[in-house]
Image: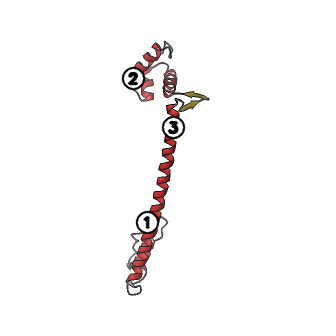
Amino acid sequence: MTRRADGPAPRSPCRLHDGTDSRVARMATSAPAEASPVPGAFRDLAVAFEEVAAGVAGTHRMLIDRVEQLSRELEQARGRADAGTALVCDGDSMTLEVLERRAILATLRQFGGHRDRTARALGIGVRTLGMKLSQWKRAGLAPEHA
């Protein structure tokens, strides 16, 4: 890169985040073409590409390991869900339905029985909330005043 007489040196297009030039940029700007033979420049470029490929391969391997780990965790969670004990609260095993009912009733109490505010806070519709409450009342799982 040539330096202009009236200002700072032009910035390298291959500057790394720490402010240094990348290896490819150093190769491109370091020596004139007659000082380094073409095969050597290609060899240096090939080495740089191999380094990049090795980094990508390492990242790819880490991603594969992470996917395998998540798959194992998912299978374990499915096994617990099939047994009906996927969620544990206060040492008691609960199904998703029990946890949902407790969360809805607690939110309803928090808003003083106001169904519109409760539904909005839970991200469900008022009609959905009403249907759940009526089902639970019929089954004796919710208080009559809810």
Q: Secondary structure at mark 3?
A: helix
**Viewport quadrant of the N terminus:** bottom left
Return the x and y of residue 86 as percentages of the image width and height.
Answer: 53, 32
Is 103 placed above or below 73 here?
above
The amino acid on which the numbered mark 1 sits, given as a three-letter code, is: Ala
How far is the residue under mark 3 from the one under mark 2? 28 Å
How far is the residue under mark 1 from the one under mark 3? 36 Å
Reading the image, the residue beneath label 1 is 53
- Which residue: 49% across, 49% down? 68
Observer-nearest residue: 126 or 62? Answer: 62
Other-residue count near label 2 (Cα within 10 Å), few / some / many at <14 / 14–19 / ≥20: few
Which is nearer the N-term, disc 1 or disc 2?
1
Return the x and y of residue 27 as percentages of the image width and height.
Answer: 42, 77
Reading the image, the residue beneath label 2 is 128
Which is nearer the N-term, disc 1 or disc 3?
1
Is 69 placed above or below 115 here?
below
Q: Secondary structure at mark 1?
A: helix
- Which residue: 40% across, 19% down? 131
Instruction: Indicate the quadrant where residue 88 lies.
Output: top right
Other-residue count near label 3 (Cα within 10 Å), few / some / many at <14 / 14–19 / ≥20: some
Q: What's the mark number on residue 77?
A: 3
Q: Nearer the viewer, mark 1 or mark 3?
A: 3
Observer-nearest residue: 75 or 20? Answer: 75
Is 38 placed above or below 111 here?
below
Observer-nearest residue: 87 or 36? Answer: 87
Label 1 close to label 3 by CB (< 8 Å): no
Q: Nearer the viewer, mark 3 or mark 2?
A: 3
The amino acid on which the numbered mark 3 sits, given as a three-letter code, is: Ala
Return the x and y of residue 109 as percentages of the image width and height.
Answer: 51, 21
Which is nearer the N-term, disc 3 or disc 2?
3
How far is the residue under mark 1 from the one under mark 2? 53 Å
Is 72 placed above or below 30 here?
above
